[in-house]
Image (tube, rainbow, N blue to C red):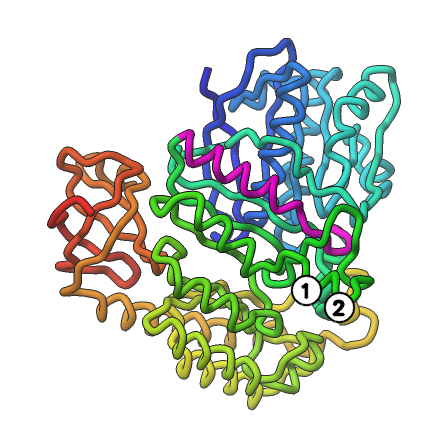
Amino acid sequence: MIQENKVIDESRQGEAVMVESTMSQGTRKLYLESYGCAMNFSDSEIIASILTKHGYETTTDESEADVVFLNTCAIRENAELRVRQRLTEFKKRKQQKPDLIIGVLGCMAERLKSKLLEEEKLIDIVAGPDSYRDLPKLIESVDSGQKAVNVLLSREETYGDISPVRLGSNGVTAFVSITRGCDNMCSFCVVPFTRGRERSRDPESIVAEVRDLFERGYREITLLGQNVDSYIWAGGGLKKEILTEEQRQASTSFAQLMEQVALVSPELRVRFSTSNPRDMTDEVLHVIARYDNICKYIHLPVQSGSTQVLHRMNRGYSREMYMERIEAIRRILPGCSLSTDTISGFCGETEEDHQETLSLMKWVGYQFSYMYKYSERPRTQAEREYKDDVDESVKSRRLAEIVALQQSLSKEKTFAMKGQVHRVLIEGPSKKSAEYLMGRTTGNIVMVFPAGNHKKGEYVDVYASDCTAATLIGEVVNKA
């Protein structure tokens, strides 16, 4: 049977996204709700796989669930507040159904640990991102009358041997995790503390998963990691910080991995996210240029256009270094679409710093951006060493200016694509009308066109005759 799970994507500013999953029948029903980034969504697919093998069945009706798991995000305060609100709602349901098991999983679980068990009496299970294999045993502990917690971080866990259940799958696109954790230690970011040190997954298992997806009809995969460009594999158990030069030369880099994935089939599109500008090499750009099926789209977070702010953020690059990477992309991948992340109001940010962010945005000309106000996160370097000294009203005003500029840039970029033919991978029906289909260009631009006899998973050539600020509208000129 086909069931639905709710996924709350923080990158979509709180939009609730209903997704479907095909699960085996079982005697207990699981309601899984995910918050945050694509990595969290990918983790939910791993959780679903583990519990499916232990006889669980998912449900969209939280009232009939025997087990409720909230897979959480700790990157921004807003996500945590929404999770706490949901826990309050589930508390009422638990009063009506005392045997209901409620668990908080993921980054928020690791950060708050036993505090969730002590303060929120309704919670039975707290499990961190590296503890998902232990979930069946944790549930057994609760069945025997115990609270259960496992938030230990691992230096080895990648879940590389687990075949994820494709939650909410449209049957065309899928995420494939290639790294876990992060070593960058940006001063504003809690990820190294909630997901642990960076470790890379065996390339053979990655390519095998990608090949399996292609054989099952998927036509686009996104390689996922907190920083995909620092991916390196030199054999099981070897950490990148202790590699000799000889071992490093013999290892698999991100550029080499991406090439292996692209070679699975020329009919399989390849995307990746996310990159750190200081780690993106020309080798990666040349591999993208070499293969038509590697999408000409790069998400390159800048966070701030000010070198002084970047230094306080501990990003590892300057404004000038970032601009050099953009120039390399323009030189090697002309026409490549670019998107970014920006944070307004970081500690010590002046009006001049803010203006530098705006000027950099104009210079790059991003297709779109994820834009946020800074919110202090516990345990980070920024919380320990800096004062959150930018007034909330100033943060809001600066964010509004960033958003307004990005809307203008997005409109300009989209309008420039009118009058051209674009190759589009059909993902399914348009949200507004079943008479129209939607897909994306290689540059990750949404395109809508009459359905005709076309089907999802097909490539078509579409002439862009019109557009909105962020969406192309056209007609199929022929099958690609």
- Where residue 302 appears, x then y in whole percent? 55, 73
Q: CA distance from mark 2 to mark 1?
A: 6 Å
**Can residue 248 be seen from the camera position used here?**
yes
Q: Residue furthest bottom?
A: 352
Rendered position, 358 above or below 199: below
Numbered circles on residues, count: 2
Residue beneath the point at 61% across and 74% down: 278
Disc 1 on helix, strand or loop? helix
**Can residue 112 be seen from the camera position used here?**
no
Quadrant for residue 192, please give it. Answer: bottom right
Label 2 CA crowd tier, 10 Å (few <14, some 14–19, many 20+): few
Q: Left or right: 128 with respect to 3? A: right
- Is residue 207 rendered magenta in the image? yes
Q: Left or right: 182 with respect to 163? A: right
- Where residue 186 appears, x then y in whole percent? 71, 69
Q: Which residues fall within the magenta stretch?
A: 195-216
Residue beneath the point at 72% across and 47% down: 108
Mark 1 — residue? 249
Identify the mark at residue 214; answer none if there is no mark.
Answer: none
Most foreground residue, 403 or 175: 175
Most foreground residue, 117 or 357: 357
Residue beneath the point at 81% across and 16% down: 143
Q: Amino acid at mark 2?
A: Glu
Disc 2 on helix, strand or loop? helix
- Where residue 431 appears, x then y in whole percent? 29, 41
Mark 2 — residue? 245
Q: Left or right: 89 with respect to 192? A: left
Q: Left or right: 383 with respect to 255? A: right
